Amino acid sequence: MSILRRIMGAELSVTLALVSGCGGNVNLGDKSSPAPGTVADGGAANVAEVPNAAHSEPVAKLAESFSIGTLAVAGEYLYFGGLDSKQAAALYRCNKNDCDPTRERLPNVSGFVSSLQTFGQRLGVANLERGVYWLGSYALPDATDKQIALGDLPPSSSYAPLFHGGFVYFSVDLEYGAYRCALPDCSNTPKRIGSTRSLSFVNFRAAGELVFWTDGQFIYRAGAYGDEPPRTLVADATLSEAPPQSMTSEMPTSDGVVSLATDDVWLYAAVTHSETGKACDSFCPHRVERWPLAGGSREILIDTEEMIRKVFVFDGELAWLGPSLRDPQNLDAARLSTCRVEACAATTRNLGEVRPDLNALVADDTDLYWLEAEPAVSQGLQSNWVMDRQIRRAQRLPPP
């Protein structure tokens, strides 16, 4: 089939350069490197100035010759991938409570890992290896038992896969399609579960047997892990079915969908909200909203004039990426904030500066972990560039 094709060398060169740039030109090093320093915590936070470093603590200080762009947490370990000073790709792990001395390269993993996700007892990856993109997984905790579910994919298809319910879900932008592939090996026979209206990033999320994705305009919901035909939904007061006329370019929806998140009960979305009813863009006010998974009355959790880039939820703690406080006009940097959904206005906190990537934030039962971004001026790069300098963490917010 057409999505299973060899990637041309030129495409690979461009894509690898872009992926490497996404992590910043940051150097992690390895256990043979000089002991890295730590970053001193700042003073009390001021929402109008800088994020509150007093809420968080450094987990690992990254060296300056390693490009890092992925992060995952499972059990006692943090996992992260990137390029070393010789531009060799690898996957690393460390003990999350003593990261720098325990950092090690995982010998069974090769290739550039552009996405990480823990599911069950496995680590799901999107990988560029020997010129070929593939989606698959490794067994935890040592990244053994390599399983390739699907290989020979276009580069953009490996950007944001979702591993859930015995499948990996991904998009193929050149075909405006959403696909599902059975784990551990779908034998190069993925199933097309729906369409998308965009060639850009497609955001997948799931809860139970329901699979959701958005292409920036609509929210799609498919039952039975994607076996049921998807419903095309509008981010309105009730998550209603999209009228036929809205599915034409002549009449787009007024509210755009930026990012999705799910828990066991709710579907969350960051949206651009139109106050006029006309089609909206990133300059419109933004909201974070939620609906029951099967549809129903909307709750508005955040209503702001600021741009919201991504939204996450971890057992009742809502997290989102807003404009950088250091440089609000820099789209390559973002501010990480969280709150409890039961009392968001009263519990909002700003945690740090991050890059607005898929792997910007992960969590375990007690803590949040993220790749902290800092200006890269010291390395002679453009003044608006930021790079992932360290891994930080903060305790999860307790229920009120």
Image (cartoon, rainbow, N blue to C red):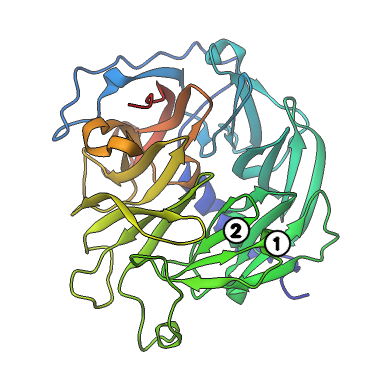
Q: Looking at the image, which residue is at 26% across and 33% down?
A: 348
Q: Position of residue 81 (x, y in %)?
A: 60, 35
Q: Looking at the image, which residue is at 75% across and 49% down?
A: 166
Image side of residue 251 versus residue 98, left or right:
left
The answer to which image quadrant residue 169 occupies is: bottom right
Q: Is residue 2 among what the camera can see?
A: yes
Q: CA distance from mark 1 to mark 2?
A: 10 Å
Name the amino acid, label 1: Arg
Q: Nearer the viewer, residue 399 or 196?
A: 399
- The residue indicated by pointer 2 is 211
Q: Looking at the image, which residue is at 63% across and 43% down?
A: 113
Q: What number is the disc on residue 180?
A: 1
Position of residue 63 relative to residue 268, above or below, is above
Q: Looking at the image, which residue is at 52% across and 26% down?
A: 28
Position of residue 174 relative to residue 16, above or below, is below
Q: Nearer the viewer, residue 159 or 203?
A: 203
Q: Nearer the viewer, residue 43 or 216?
A: 216
Tell me, yes or no, whether the two marked residues, 1 and 2, touch with CB atoms within 8 Å: yes
Name the amino acid, label 2: Val
Q: Helix, strand, or loop for circle 2? A: strand
Other residues around mark 2 within 10 Å, as few (<14) / some (14–19) / many (≥20): many
Image side of residue 213 versus residue 378, left or right:
right
Q: Position of residue 303 (x, y in %)?
A: 22, 52
Q: Helix, strand, or loop for circle 1? A: strand
Q: Position of residue 36 (x, y in %)?
A: 46, 14
